[in-house]
Image (spheres, grey):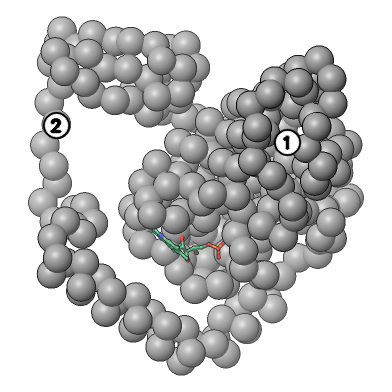
Amino acid sequence: VRVFALIGSPRKRGNGELGARYIASEAGATEFRFVRLMSKNIKDCRACYRCLEDKCPLDDDYGIILEEILRADAIIVAIPSYFFGDNASAKRFLDRGLQFYAHFKELKGKPAVGIVTAGMDYGEGYAQLALDNMLERMGLDNRGTEVLYGAMPGEIFLREENFGKLKTLASCLGGEMRIERGGDVACSLCGYPYFRFGKDGEISCLVCGSRYSSEGGVNLSRKEGTGIDLFDLQKLEEHREWLIGMKMKFLSMRNELKKVVAENFRPGEEI
Ligand SMILES: Cc1cc2nc3c(=O)[nH]c(=O)nc-3n(C[C@H](O)[C@H](O)[C@H](O)COP(=O)(O)O)c2cc1C
């Protein structure tokens, strides 16, 4: 299997890249190539719609990335959470996606998995939704996505549960497995579990727009102490201090991180 990965992080050997390398290797990839989206010239979509029938008129690196995707047997996408969502590289790439329409015959059914990396527990916000949406809009067979927590580069390997998630994703990519998306609360049209609770009890699916009524009522009760509260000035200032502290922590943990990265580093070729 030839595996190709889109890496959204600007970091070399960042958590997303390390995770993608690990998945490809565990999935038994015979070839693993990846692109760091931020190191390529990817222009913004100009909304000319020309690519639907002709070539995209923008002159940049998009075409070579698309070729790699078409050539690969399986795809990994790794996106870092920035400001409780996906980072700009992912959306910029996806926004050029009218070009996929000329290739859906090759893309449809191609196995894909995704990882979101996030520095704070439950700090991913809508990044997993964005990632699932991205895989779906690319026409890929989204076998599953996971959120991996870890702030400093390499830190995902300091948390045991991340190995389980990476191995599961590898089984999805290299085998027949898929991660069940949402159980009882998944949308019956698209299967994703992301909903908006609107006025008058109307619930809508954020992936496909299906609408649901909640005649039976929806009973939510927030678990005490949960939620990342950055909603007043003092909390924001405390968060800034925490972020500065993390930089110090990184310096003090450098050797430990280097060691765990070396232990879990898997091969791959950057395009
Ligand atoms: C500009 C910026 C914004 C970030 N925002 C968030 C956030 O909203 N939630 C979170 O959990 N982590 C946030 N992080 C932390 C990253 O998600 C975290 O470091 C992650 O490991 C990055 O993955 P990477 O090593 O693949 O780049 C942010 C990092 C940066 C640089």
Which residue position holds label 1? 175
Residue 81, given in percent of the width and then of the height, sits at 46, 54
Pick the front one: 42 or 190: 42
Q: Nearer the viewer, residue 245 or 262?
A: 245
Amino acid at circle 2? Leu
- Residue 168 in view of the camera: no
Left or right: 65 in relation to 219:
right
* Up-down relation of residue 202 to residue 246 (above or below): above
Q: Does the beta carbon of the residue at mark 2 sit less than 8 Å from ligand 1?
A: no
Instruction: State the image quarter where residue 238 is shown.
Output: bottom left
**Picture quarter with the N terminus:** top right
Q: Nearer the viewer, residue 50 or 208?
A: 50
* Residue 188 percent across, percent down from the top left: 43, 12
The first of marks 2 and 1 along the sequence is 1
- Does residue 173 sit above or below 204 in this rendering? below
Q: Which residue is mark 2?
A: 220
Q: CA distance from mark 2 to mark 1?
A: 37 Å
Report the image quarter containing ligand 1: bottom left
